[in-house]
Amino acid sequence: MTTFSFSLLTGENGPLVTLNAPETFSIPTPTHKSIVSEGDEVLADEKIAEATRPGVGDVHSPAAGKIEDITVDAIVVCRSGTGQNTPDSAPPSGGKALREWLRGLGINTYQLVRASQLIINAVPPEPGISIYEPLIQDYRHIVELGLDAVQRIVNPSKLHLVVAKGNRTNAFPNCSILQVPPVYPNGIDQLVIKATTGEETLLGTRPKDATILSIRDLYYIGKVMETKRPLTETIMTIGKDNLLIKIGTQIRHLAQEAGVTVQPGDRVIFGGLMRGVAALNIDQGVDKYTTGMIILRHDEGLSPTDNFCLGCGECERHCPARIMPGLISRCAEFKHFERAEDYHIHSCIECGICGYWCKAQRPLLQYIKLAKYEIALLRTASSTLEGEGQ
């Protein structure tokens, strides 16, 4: 078992550092439809892909250049020139018009719904990810612009700010502060909602009469409101630095700027060590909601195996959702996906703690995500067949 700190204390970080822009961008578009073609010349901030799912923001080019390639899940732009698209004025009113305007400029608006309570999550999402602290301390005016815009859409009567006890923070006007223990996974939205309202929600669903946004969400919205330009940047923790990075920046450029080399056998993790996703290759680019990058050397970290579950119960004892990850993983392993629903697979908040404590080092979270994916496919297929039968 490797040692790992679950602490969410971040300490002093200083303002964001702007990373030098690369020559080539690989912009992820997993839920988008391209509206450009290979060889097209685009301006900075020009829309290049439209979202195919409700509430997901459109994608814009982070720089002027030429469309080099379009794949199933990415658009490659080679930087050239300095042309920039004109700003887009915000609607004078709030509500649906402002919400749609923000979505068109790249903001994910799924959580921007009317509710009596607005929860601001300022708890770090994972250990080692410290992007919230500089936003609260050094970019507060932009965060407040974002909060003002959100309030014009959500129209809440109560405002809650949830922070990790021990981290610096300042309250917003007419806002109550709730401190939670600075231990992972207390920064996950479902646990923040539970601590604030007492309500338990499934991953991907909203509470009954509340909505939740992170400090980073407010910063992004505030930045769009201030500049009238689309969201083309992300904020990431790399090492001990918090960086402002253009979306589509490739791993090879991030590693070069950080002065490190990715060796054969290393794994590059986008996000944190608990919930992060391993990149496919060093040409993969970051998206607007990538929180960090960690390079795991080939001899570091756990080595997942397909060993049999030992039935030790460690995953169950540490699971914040109070489910049985080991049993659910066995359902996934043997393709009994629907049976996994009998064991409340949808209550999983995907924190990854089960895999950390697994004595057999089974990839429990990966099994659970696979089962959720297969269940969704089965539901889609059933709905299609029912529609064809009518």
Image (spheres, rainbow, N blue to C red):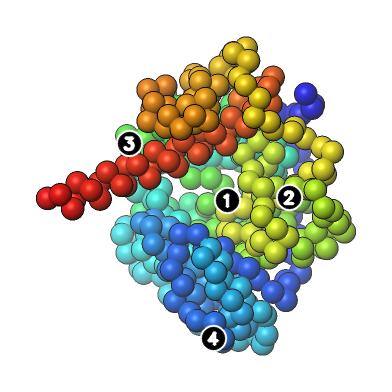
**In the picture, which quadrant includes the N terminus?**
top right
- The mark that comes first in sequence, 1 or 3, is 3
The residue at 42%/64% (across/down) is 51
Amino acid at pointer 3: Asp
Between the C-alphas of marks 2 and 1, the distance is: 23 Å
The alpha-carbon separation of the residues under discs 2 and 4 comes to 31 Å
**Residue carrying label 1:** 216
Q: Is residue 246 above or below residue 13?
A: below
- Label 4 neighbour load within 10 Å: few <14, some 14-19, many 20+: few
Give how far across and how far down residue 267 sits, in percent.
Answer: 75, 47
Tags 2 and 1 touching, CB below 8 Å: no
Q: Which dot, 4 or 3, sits closer to the camera?
A: 4
Q: CA distance from mark 4 to mark 3?
A: 45 Å
Q: Which mark is residue 268?
A: 2
Residue under pointer 4? 40
Q: Are marks 2 and 4 in contact (CB under 8 Å)?
A: no
Q: Position of residue 148 (x, y in %)?
A: 45, 54
Which mark is first along the chain, 3 or 4? 4
**Picture coordinates of residue 108, whole percent (x, y):** 45, 56
Q: Residues within 10 Å of mark 2 (few under 14, many from 20)?
A: many
- Residue at which label 3 appears: 209
Q: Earlier in the sequence, mark 2 or mark 4?
A: 4
**Front position among marks 2 and 1:** 2
